[in-house]
Image (tube, rainbow, N blue to C red):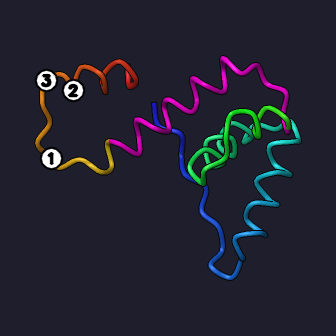
Amino acid sequence: MVLSEIQFEDSLSSKEIRDLIFKEISTPSSNRILYIAQAFRVGMSIDEVFNLCFIDRWFLLQIKEIVDSEINLKNKSLRINIRSLRILSRWLF
């Protein structure tokens, strides 16, 4: 599973991006999960996200683990060992 990264305008400051993420997480919508994933990408904690959306921490942890796996995968070369492949396949299938 891949949670698409939200693209922001280059003209937005870090504070404006963070404020937009806060707003989108606080409001139920079909894109909320994407903003939750983006919040984890920019370093927000599970507790910070929980305080905005009140989604069960267990589900937030699952989303964070997907995002963390995605980040780890982006940092790897094309060579991947069997253990890493198995871990990755667990998240993708």
Tell me the number on the disc at residue 57: none
Q: Residue at x 79, y 24 (%)?
A: 55
Q: Secondary structure at mark 2?
A: helix
Label 3 is placed on what type of residue? Ile
Q: Which residue is mark 3?
A: 82
Horizontal side of 90 relative to 84 (left or right) equals right
Q: Residue at x 48, y 31 (%)?
A: 66
| Count of numbered circles on the image | 3
In contact (CB < 8 Å): disc 2 and disc 3: yes
Split into 4 quadrants, where in the image is the N terminus?
Answer: top left
Q: CA distance from mark 1 to mark 3?
A: 13 Å
Horizontal side of 15 relative to 52 (left or right) equals left
Q: Which residue is mark 2?
A: 85
Q: CA distance from mark 1 to mark 2?
A: 11 Å
- Is 26 colored magenta in this rendering? no
- Is 54 colored magenta in this rendering? yes
Q: Which residue is mark 1?
A: 78
Q: Nearer the viewer, residue 69 or 5?
A: 69
Q: Quadrant of residue 91?
A: top left
Residues in magenta, as a range: 52-72
Main secondary structure found in the magenta portion: helix
Q: Nearer the viewer, residue 34 or 59?
A: 59
Split into 4 quadrants, where in the image is the C terminus?
Answer: top left
Horizontal side of 36 relative to 63 (left or right) equals right
Horizontal side of 69 relative to 77 (left or right) equals right
The 10 Å Cα crowd at callout 1, few under 14, some 14 to 19, many 20 or more, is few
x and y percent of residue 28 in the render?
A: 86, 36
x and y percent of residue 19 in the render?
A: 82, 60
Label 1 is placed on what type of residue? Leu
In contact (CB < 8 Å): disc 1 and disc 3: no
Is 17 rendered above or below residue 48? Answer: below
**Residue lying at the far bottom of the rendered structure:** 11
